[in-house]
Amino acid sequence: MTATSPTARSRVPRDAPDSPTSTARVRVRVNRLVLYTVLVTVTGLFLGPFGWLIVSGLKTPAELAASPVHWLPAVFRWDNFADAYHLIDFLGYARNSLVIATIYATLITLSSAWVGYGFARLNAPGKKVLFGILIGSMMLPQMITLLPTYLIFARLGMVDTYWPWVLWGLSAAPYLVFLFRQFFAGLPRELEEAAIVDGCGYAAIFWRIFLPQSWPVLSASFIIAFTWSWGDYLAPQLLLSSDRSTLAVAVMSSYVTSAGTPVTNLQAAASVMYVVPILLIFLVAQRGFVAGMSTTGLK
């Protein structure tokens, strides 16, 4: 009987079927497959409504009203998109939406950054109580404050102007204040102390040091605020006339028959074109958006 030499034992393949390394690799592959399956499923759930909107824009009104549901049109009617574009002043309404959303997003991002800086770096009596009230105000739905807001703007003569969005932008948003407060609270205290030694006041510290450091949160906040304003229907419908109105209002109210019945296939086609700018903005700025959301609150 010949004993197995150490050299012979060392020549056993490392990736043998029963080796720990092979088992670990199989487990990693299975976990990765499960993860990818879950991600693809969730992505499909999120993209499903948008895909159905595109398909609806390629149908006729009869196909949209058919029962049982026609999943695909008999003929893809790409001319629905051209009709939806030409039946209204699409570019004019889009320009109004772009101006309002840009003004609002820029102002509310800066004002929220300033308020968040104050809550994060300045000390004052009752600061925690005020911050709690500010965060609690996020639970108030827009419908509760919309009518009093309209009455105030009507008395000030600001109806059918863009001034309401300027004032809203200067008032800061609780959620964005929370984002900036969490980000500024994680910056080193030494930056602020060195600036104070050099003679900077708190305003100079904010504009020259803290704000340039917060570009990920600035990007995320701007995208969030721009999306809020671009997708808002109630405020423009209430405060603006038809020629100054936004694309959201035009898409929902302009495509109707003489009897007042909505033309659903044109509404769907116009809605697709209405969503595309937001998708493009997110695709261009997604790195800054993800970075801003992931770094907020990290020390």
Image (cartoon, rainbow, N blue to C red):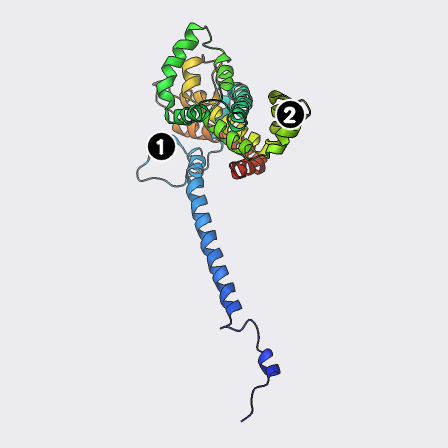
Disc 1 residue type (three-letter)? Ala
Location of mark 2 (residue)? 196
- Does label 1 or label 2 sit earlier along the sequence? 1
Task: Identify which residue is drawn at 52% across, 26% down.
Answer: 116
- The location of residue 92, given as percent across then percent down, is 53, 18
Task: Identify which residue is drawn at 46% across, 22% down.
Answer: 125
Residue 210 relative to residue 250: left or right? right
Q: Quadrant of residue 7?
A: bottom right
- The location of residue 171, given as percent across then percent down, is 49, 18
Nearer the observer, 31 or 44: 31
Q: Quadrant of residue 212?
A: top right
Task: Tell me the tag on residue 62.
Answer: 1
Nearer the observer, 238 or 133: 133
Residue 278 relative to residue 151: left or right? right
- The location of residue 25, given as percent across then percent down, is 52, 64
- The location of residue 120, given as percent across then percent down, is 52, 28
Task: Identify which residue is drawn at 44% across, 33% down.
Answer: 57
Residue 94 visible in the picture = no
Nearer the observer, 109 or 45: 109
Disc 2 residue type (three-letter)? Ile
Which residue is the extreme one toward the right? 198
In which quadrant is the C terminus drawn?
top right
Instruction: Name the secondary structure under disc 1.
Output: helix
Residue 168's place in the image compared with 33, above or below, is: above
Instruction: Name the secondary structure under disc 2.
Output: helix
